[in-house]
Image (cartoon, helix red, strand yellow):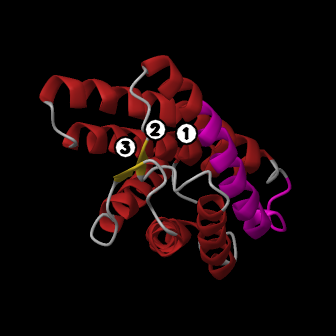
Amino acid sequence: MKTPLKFLWLWTLATCGGFLASLFWMEISEGTEIGIIQAAVGGLAIALPQSLLLRDHIFTLKWVLFTLVAWVTITAIGVGAIGWIVPPAEFLPLRLLNGARSGFFGGFGIGLAQWLAIRQPVSWAWQWIIVNSLSWAIAIPVGTTIGFILRHLTRWFLGEVAGLAITWLIVAILTGINAYRLLK
């Protein structure tokens, strides 16, 4: 097993790199404009590099498939492709509240699906569901608030994209710390 810092660095690189790679095929949008196919492409872009880091501990095909299904499902049921959508709310407290809510439920769906891939080899794998729920519930309000501020300061939508990148960075760090802890 890699050292904690090396694993965290690689996990963050894999997750954020997957997000950046997904932008070649996906478009950041406002509201719930991202469709199921785009959610599948985004989920695949995240799950593939993560699975490379997990390959010694879990069946990676399950990780990729279950992660993909989770992204498609949370998009189909109306939670949205969290991490690729900008909240439409211009009222900051509402954006924070909605971000925490959608982050929690989206993170729960993703965590539950990924738990199905890791539950056999890891005895404390159920914690992954909680970790994902809380990571996304924290990251979305923080990232979208920063994006909101940057957009209003610069008048460019790119500020929102930077906020989403920060969201992914926070999720990558929080889940990376816990992924290492669960797998060691």
Tell me if mark 3 has few (under 14), some (14-19) or many (20+) residues whose alpha carbon lies within 10 angstroms of its own.
Answer: many
The label nearer to you, 1 versus 3, is 3
Q: Position of residue 180 (x, y in %)?
A: 61, 50
Q: CA distance from mark 2 to mark 3?
A: 10 Å
Tell me, yes or no, whether the two marked residues, 1 and 2, touch with CB atoms within 8 Å.
Answer: yes
Write the residue at 44% across / 31% down. Answer: 89
Q: Position of residue 16 (x, y in %)?
A: 38, 54
Visible in this render: residue 181?
no
Q: Which residues are magenta?
A: 100-123
Q: Which residue is mark 3?
A: 164
Q: Which residue is mark 2?
A: 170
Q: CA distance from mark 1 to mark 2?
A: 6 Å
Visible in this render: residue 59?
yes
Q: Amino acid at mark 2?
A: Ile
Q: Is residue 42 left or right of residue 29?
A: right
N-terminal-most mark, 1 or 3: 3
Is 162 located above or below residue 69 in the figure?
A: above
**Depth check, front residue: 139 or 73:** 73
Instruction: Determine whether the residue tagged by mark 1 lies in a helix, strand or loop.
Output: helix
Q: Amino acid at mark 3?
A: Leu
N-terminal-most mark, 2 or 3: 3
Q: Position of residue 52 (x, y in %)?
A: 50, 72
Q: Which mark is residue 174?
A: 1
Write the residue at 40% across / 33% down. Answer: 144
**Depth check, front residue: 134 or 10:** 134
Q: Is residue 133 left or right of residue 151?
A: right
Q: Is residue 158 left or right of residue 144?
A: left
Write the residue at 58% across / 25% down. Answer: 97
Q: Amino acid at mark 1?
A: Leu
